[in-house]
Image: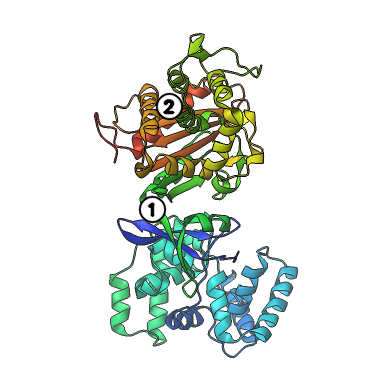
Amino acid sequence: MADYEGYVVYGKKNNKRQAFGVISNNSECKAVSKRIPSNLKKIIVEIEDKRFYQHHGIDIHGIIRASIQNFKAKKIVQGGSTITQQLSRNMLRVNNKTLYRKIRESIKALELENQYSKDEILDLYFNNVYWGKNIIGLRSASLHYFGKEIHYLTQEESLTLLTILRGPNYYLKNKDKLAFRYNLLNSILLERKNITNKRHKKNLDKFPLLQNNPIQILRREVIPFITESIEDKKCVIKSTIDNNLQALINKIINSSNQPISIVSIQNGKIIAFGSRFGSDYPFITKANVGSTLKPFIYCFLRKNGVLNEKYSSYTNKLDWTVREATTVKPYLTIQAALLVSNNNVFINSCEKVGMDICLDYLSDIFNKNREYFYPSSILGATECGISLYELAIAYNNFFKCKSLDSYKIECLNILKLNARNKLGFNIDNVFLKTGTTNDNQERYAILGNPDKVFAILRNEKYNSDTEKEGSFVKQIRDFASLVLNTRKNYKWT
């Protein structure tokens, strides 16, 4: 698999492509740009390092000049570091003000000057310089602060980004200082004839406001699941993501008291995803999924002759001791067992039909080797586990409109009743299936309709939480009220 580090991921917002993420296997938002505008290179040299094209990484004249100015002012008012030294500092990730750091920085600067052309050094500089928060590089800064790619920046916006470069976090907190430095740089550029009087006036009249467009850090493992196309020349990945829904899910995940993960799939494509444990968690982490497998088994049992007969809900033919979620009548039909998620009835009915063919069926549903499924898989346990993504795509494929038969419709009606009972919403075609596993430390919910599915996993933090089930259902109810239209008798389409 290619690396794609620094590629910008685009989703769709109101039918238009918009960036929402950057591929990064650490916490830095570092978008790569293969082409830096020449006017920005010219301005940064004028502002930061006038002798950039004359020195070889270390500017003795600049050091002497800065020392004299600092001595006169009796404080540090100028720095003697060249652009190449600043690049070295960013690449070495060393910010402590020591002689040792300065020596390392200088050696690295000389190496860079020997290895790259001046133009290449400027490209490296703009791709590695720190722009506040976790923003690294000009492209990330352009996307975060102005919501656009570099080549769409206005001259005023470009100047603003260069203004905060000297101390991003300081200027972001001090708007008056930001405006003062912006005007100062604007005047310097006019004085040195880098801009015209007309441009100088436009810069003054159109001082842009910095925005806060969150750019999500995405690990490269998510790429195969969300990609529509890749443009290597632009370092762009076009995805299937719905940016509005993605932003909502990020907000829900970040505000949850318990760690949760969510995957949403519509018509076989991922439209939103996320996890407190990292963007790749819903795809690569596999676990037992509890009672969420029961709807698949239910449809198979109905097709294979299980009708309205009743089975023991307290014991099973395998003599397993299983935990049940609720107290029920001693004997239940498979329909009633699905509604209350009774384990014993499902074990007994699978034994009647044939455990092996039931497991063959589950193997086909999840496209996994049959050897990974054994009798306890009826209760959601498999040898290799099932990821949240695999669970969501299985539901979406299984219950899609074109594949619905009478048994699936019957199953959906039971799950729709379950949704109404637990959520209290009178929405015509929404289904809900929940499940718990790992001694109730992991709780699953599948919420959806034949076109769209949300798979949700909550990892419990406290074993002593006696209100887990109630608080989880409340969280799902709150989630549903945000992603669905919960008006009475509304049909979710």
Most distant residue in the right direction:
100
For the residue labelled by badge 2, is the local secondary structure a helix, a strand or a loop? Answer: helix
Q: Is residue 461 visible?
A: no
Q: Amino acid at mark 2?
A: Lys
Q: Nearer the viewer, residue 435 or 328?
A: 328
Q: In the displayed structure, does residue 446 sit left or right of residue 461?
A: left
Q: Residues within 10 Å of mark 2 (few under 14, many from 20)?
A: some
- Residue 128 location (% of width, % of height): 57, 70
The residue drawn where x is 65% and y is 17% is: 321
In the image, residue 9 sits, relative to residue 234, either above or below, namely above
Q: Residues within 10 Å of mark 1 (few under 14, many from 20)?
A: many
Q: In the displayed structure, does residue 214 sit left or right of residue 368?
A: left
Q: Nearer the viewer, residue 164 or 297?
A: 297
In the image, residue 410 sits, relative to residue 31, either above or below, namely above
- Residue 263 location (% of width, % of height): 47, 44
Most distant residue in the top direction:
330
Q: In the displayed structure, does residue 446 sit left or right of residue 350?
A: left
Q: Earlier in the sequence, mark 2 or mark 1?
A: 1
Q: In the displayed structure, does residue 136 sit left or right of residue 212?
A: right
Q: Amino acid at mark 1?
A: Asn
- Residue 470 location (% of width, % of height): 47, 22
Q: Is residue 135 visible?
A: yes
- Residue 270 location (% of width, % of height): 44, 50
Which residue is label 2 attached to? 474
The residue drawn where x is 42% and y is 72% is: 150
The alpha-carbon separation of the residues under discs 2 and 1 comes to 25 Å
Find out whether the residues at labels 2 and 1 contact each other: C-beta distance under 8 Å.
no
In the image, residue 255 sits, relative to residue 197, either above or below, namely above
Q: Quadrant of residue 212?
A: bottom left
For the residue labelled by badge 1, is the local secondary structure a helix, a strand or a loop? Answer: helix
Q: Nearer the viewer, residue 281 or 55?
A: 281
Which residue is label 1 attached to? 243
